[in-house]
Amino acid sequence: MKKKLILCLGIIMFFFKNSASANYEKIFYDLNIESISGEIINFRDFKDKVVLVVNTASYCGFTKQYEELQDLWDKYNKKGLIVLGVPSNSFNQEKKKNSEVKEFCEVNFGITFPLSAITEVKGNNAHELFKWAKTNHGSSAVPKWNFHKILINKEGKIEDTFSSFTKPLSNKIVNKIESIL
C-alpha cells in the first residue's frame, strides 16, 4: 500500500512538474519589436533588467492605468525596471496611426517609457512576443483585454502575468517587481 502511494505521488509530481515548467527555446532577450517611432527595440538591450510588458489602448476603460505605468517607470527605472507599452487594436480600442498614439500618450499622460508600434497581441496574427509568451507560460499570458501585464524576470523568462483589472501600482505587482529587481 505504501509503495503504491509513493508511486502515485511520484507520478502526480512528475505531471505537475512538466506542466509548470517551460522549455524556453528562446528567451525574451532573443526577441524585438518595432518602436512607435519606427526603430527596432532589441530586447537584448534590456538584458539583466526586469520588464513589464503591457498591451495598451487609447479608448479603453483601463487607459488611466497609463498614469500608474508612468509612476512605476519613474520609481523603478533606475533600479532596473523597463515598462514597455504595446499599443494594440486587437480589441478595437486603439487609434489608427502610431503618431496619434504617441501624441495621445505624451500629451495626456506624459509617457516617457518605451512604446511599440501598434501591434496585434492575440490570435494567429499576434506578434512573436505574445506567441512566445503563450508557448512558454500558457493561456494566462494571452491578453484577454487591454492593459494585460506580463512580467519578465532578469533571466528573460516570464515571472508572472496580471489581468487588466490589476492596477500597475497594486501591492501584487509592486511586491513582485521589488522581489525580482
Image (cartoon, grey):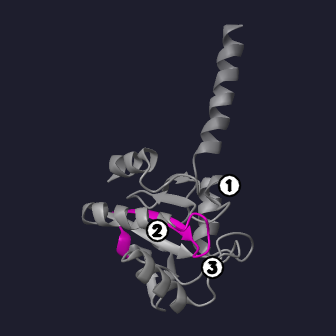
The amino acid beneath tag 3 is Glu
Q: 48 and 120: which one is in front?
A: 120
Q: Secondary structure at mark 1?
A: helix
Mark 3 or mark 1: whose residue is earlier in sequence: 3
Q: Visible in this render: residue 27?
A: no
Q: Is residue 57 magenta?
A: yes
Mark 1 or mark 2: whose residue is earlier in sequence: 2
Mark 2, residue position: 66
Q: Position of residue 113 (x, y in %)?
A: 38, 74
How far apart are the alpha carbons under marks 3 and 1?
23 Å
In the image, residue 41 above or below residue 47: below
For residue 139, the mark is 1
Highlighted magenta segment, given as a residue range: 45-63
Number of other residues with Cα within 10 Å of mark 1, as a class: few under 14, some 14 to 19, many 20 or more: few
Which quadrant of the structure image shows residue 109?
A: bottom left
Q: Is residue 6 magenta?
A: no
Name of the residue lying farthest toward the right = 124
How far apart are the alpha carbons under marks 2 and 3?
14 Å
In the image, residue 138 above or below residue 112: above
For residue 94, the mark is 3
Of tags 3 and 1, the one toward the viewer is: 3
Q: Position of residue 11 (x, y in %)?
A: 68, 29
